[in-house]
Amino acid sequence: MVIDLIESDEFINMIPSECIKTNALERIKLTLSKSPVVVFMKGSPKEPADGYQREVIEMMDKCRVRYTHFDVLKDSVRLISFLNHFNYRT
């Protein structure tokens, strides 16, 4: 059960952010190192926030793409740090 939580990224969400010692950029690099494909999405593959997110996940699953996801709604600090690091303009 614990392994399932860790693999689905649910475990990290259970840990209070003040207990995580890595900075935002290190956490982004960790996410990017998990898989060659990272889906930045609203929600999770099990609970997409809307139809667009659901379609992306269905397409990835149908094509058997191995991916991890990044929930921009739950971890906006990490997303903002990532965008700032690469000078990405929204």
Image (cartoon, rainbow, N blue to C red):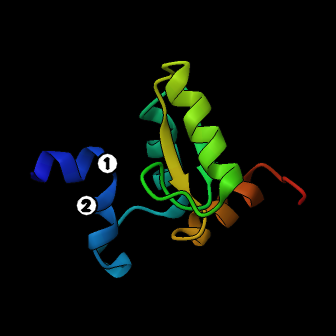
Q: Residue at x 23, y 50 (%)?
A: 6
The vertical placement of 57 against 37, above or below, is below
Tell me the tag on residue 8. 1
Q: Position of residue 44 (x, y in %)?
A: 48, 55
Question: Comparing marks 2 and 1, which lies closer to the viewer?
Answer: 1
Instruction: Check the image and name the residue furthest to the left.
Output: 1
Mark 1 belongs to which amino acid?
A: Ser
Seen at 34% across and 53% down, the residue is: 9
Picture residue at 14% right of the left edge, 45% below the top: 3
As drawn, 12 above or below 36: below
Along the line of sight, the residue nearer the viewer: 55 or 90: 55
Between 16 and 85, the one nearer to me in the picture: 16
Q: Quadrant of the C terminus?
A: bottom right
From the image, tell me which residue sits under label 2.
11
What is the secondary structure assignment of the residue under circle 2? helix
The residue closer to the viewer here, 55 or 14, is 55
Residue 67: percent from left, percent from top: 48, 32
